[in-house]
Amino acid sequence: MLELSGKAAVVTGGSRGIGRAIAVTLAGLGAKVAVNYTSNSKAAQETVEQITGSGGSAAAIAADVTDAGQAKALIETAKKRLGSVDILVNCAGITRDGLLVRMKDEDWDEVLQTNLTGVFNCTRAAASVMMKKRWGRIVNISSVVGLYGNAGQANYCASKAGVIGFTKAVAKELGSRGITVNAIAPGFIQTDMTMKLSEGLREEMTKRVVLGRPGTPEDVAWLAAFLSSDLASYITGQIIGVDGGIVM
Ligand code: NAP
C-alpha cells in the first residue's frame, strides 16, 4: 500500500503547479508537509488550506532556494515544525526563455541559480538530517528538455540536464545511508509556467505527446509519491519520464 504516515516532507516550489499537487498528494498519503515558496504567500496558504481542509498536516515556509542560507533555514524550520525531514522534493523552478545569441547574462544566471544551485542548496541541507536517520527520499524535478534539448531554452535545458547528473552523483554518495535519489522528467504539464506560452506553441507541444493531451500536475505527483515511499526502496539514481510518451 502506498502510504507515508509518520514521514515529514519538504516540497520546494510547493505553492503552485506541480509542487502544489505533490504537496497535496504526499499529505493525502499521511505525510506532514512543508510547503515552500519564494514570493507567493497567498498561493502557499491556499495549498496549506487545501491540505488541512482534508484533514492533513502542512505548514507554509518562505525561502528563496537560490540562497544557501535560506535553503538551510528552510530545512531547519521544517525539522522543527514537522519533527523531521524524511522526504525532499526539489520542485522550485523558473524559465527565462530566449535564443542563445540574445540571452542576457541575468537570464542565464537566474535559471541556473534557481533550477540547479537551488537543488544543490536544499539537498545538501536535507542530506545531513537524513544521513543521521539512515533513511531518506530525494526526488528532483528535471524535465524532458534536459534529455533532448529545446531551441530557445539553453539556460533551462542546461539546468535540467545538470539536475540529472547531480541526481546520479548524489544517489551514489548517499545510497549506503538508506537514502534514494531520483529525478522525474515531466513533459508538457499544464501549469502557470506553460500557460505563459502562446496557444500555437502549446498546440505544437501537444502534438508531440503520444497520449494526445498535456499532462496534469497530478500525473507527476503520483510518481513523486511512489518514489518517496518505502515501496520504492530499491530504486535510485533513475530519471523517470512522466511525459505521455514524448521520450521513448
Ligand atoms: P510554476 O507553476 O511556475 O511554479 C513554480 C514554483 O516554484 C512556485 O511554487 C514558485 O514559488 C517556486 N519558485 C520559483 N523560484 C523559487 C525560488 N527561488 N525559491 C523557492 N521557490 C521558488 O511551475 P511548474 O510548472 O509547476 O514547475 C515545477 C517544476 O517542474 C519546475 O522545476 C519546472 O522546471 C518543472 N517542469 C515543469 C514542466 C511543465 O510543463 N510545467 C515540465 C517539466 C518540468 P512562488 O509561488 O512563490 O512564485
Image (spheres, grey):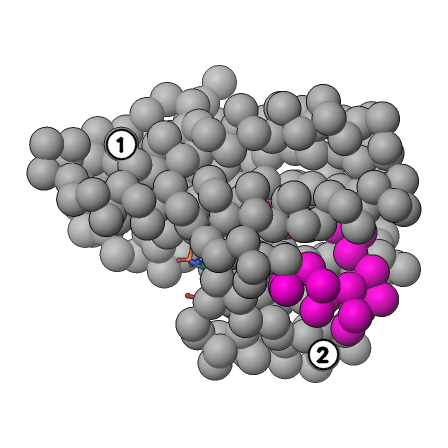
x then y, percent, for residue 159:
40, 35
Q: How far is disc 2 from disc 1 in space, using C-alphas?
A: 39 Å
| Residue 201 in sight from this viewpoint | yes
x then y, percent, for residue 132:
88, 45
In this view, the residue farthest toward the front is 69
Identify the image quadrant of residue 145: top left
Q: Which residues are magenta?
A: 73-92
Q: Secondary structure at mark 2?
A: helix
- In the displayed structure, does residue 95 sit left or right of residue 22? left
Q: Residue at x 56, y 42 (%)?
A: 120
Badge 2 is on which residue?
A: 52
Per the image, is 78 magenta?
Answer: yes
x then y, percent, for residue 62:
54, 71
Q: Secondary structure at mark 1?
A: helix
Q: Residue at x 73, y 44 (%)?
A: 127
Q: Nearer the viewer, mark 2 or mark 1?
A: 1
Residue 125, relative to residue 33: is it above or below?
A: above
Q: Amino acid at mark 1?
A: Ala
Per the image, is 122 magenta?
Answer: no
- Ligand 1 sits in which quadrant? bottom left
Q: Residue at x 90, y 46 (%)?
A: 133
- In the displayed structure, does residue 125 sit left or right of residue 155? right
Residue sitting nearer the eye, 52 or 136: 136
